[in-house]
Image (cartoon, rainbow, N blue to C red):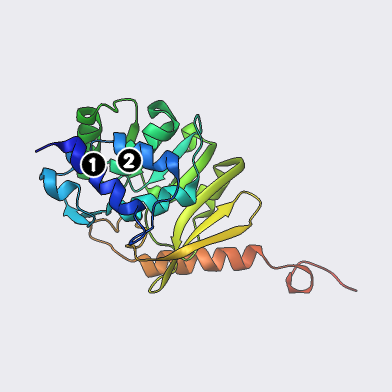
Amino acid sequence: MDRAALREDMVDSLEHESKAVLEDDAVGVAMRETPRHEFLADDRQAYADREHERLGTRVLSPSVVARLLQALTPRPGDAVLVVGAGVGYTAAVLAELVGETNVHAVDIARPIVYEARENLARAGYEGVLVDCRDGARGLPEYAPFDRILLEAAAVEPPRTLREQLAPGGRLVFPCGSRRQRLLAIEDDGSREEHGVVAFDPLLVEGEQSGAIERDRTAREDLEFARRRAESRRGWEQDWIEWD
């Protein structure tokens, strides 16, 4: 079985007019170079355009990865943060695009972090940093980032992540709960939509698989309440003396 040929066929199918999901030449070259079989057990299945399940996490299909990276528009030398490392494949393709030491990835599940590290090392991307973190908090030690990719759905990206964007930076994430849209947000707040997607929600500490607490609703309610309180102006403020 010629893995290089399987990889070529995979990318060709994404570029073909029947799918037409891959238009960016740089992303196409990166996906042709990245050995996807190192991230999945079965060689042939690795290059099929379908998603997989591994250690309780979703391994994105090649077509979804292509859409994410095209929306992200990474440039050589960009510092990139991937929130939701998964098995490491997206980070590996990014390593081809920006350089492996410029790619940082976090995941809330420690078994997934170990898996991603092993896969990346075996595939030849030892320079990619993968850490076990609450993705909503980002990776402040290495901020700012030129590009941040959030591989989990949220109504709005956590403020902490947006604060870790460099000037001129871009954050891409699946926006929404039930019906989701892939959004790219610039550091100035401008937004660009890239079609419909379906992702699992962003989890924080206590919500990951095996944890006792999975109260995402309470966390989101608290976030909305905080934002609303901070957005109050003028006559809404109790401390302003108008007389």
- Toward the viewer: 136 or 29? 29
90 displayed left or right of 173:
left
Residue 43 against residue 205 in the figure, above or below: above
Measuring from the top left, give residue 233's x and y in whole percent: 74, 67
Give yes or no for contact between labels 2 and 1 (Cβ–Cβ under 8 Å): yes
29 displayed left or right of 59:
right
Outermost front residue: 17
Q: At 9% across and 38% down in the image, what residue appears?
A: 1
**Residue 134 appears in the picture as rendered:** yes
Q: CA distance from mark 2 to mark 1?
A: 8 Å
Type of the residue with mark 2: Met
- Toward the viewer: 132 or 195? 195
Marks 2 and 1, the one that precedes in the sequence: 1
Q: At 16% across and 44% down in the image, what residue appears?
A: 40
Residue 55 against residue 218 in the figure, above or below: above
Q: At 17% across and 55% down in the image, what residue appears?
A: 53
22 displayed left or right of 194:
left
Measuring from the top left, give residue 215's x and y in whole percent: 33, 66
Residue 174 against residue 77 in the figure, above or below: below
Give the quadrant of residue 217.
Answer: bottom left
- Toward the viewer: 46 or 84? 46
* SS for callout 2: helix
**For residue 31, which numbered disc appears in the image?**
2
**For residue 17, which numbered disc appears in the image?**
none
* SS for callout 1: helix
Looking at the rendered image, the quarter that the C terminus falls into is: bottom right
Type of the residue with mark 1: Arg
Measuring from the top left, give residue 145's x and y in whole percent: 52, 38
Q: Residues within 10 Å of mark 1 (few under 14, many from 20)?
A: many
Pointer 1 residue? 7
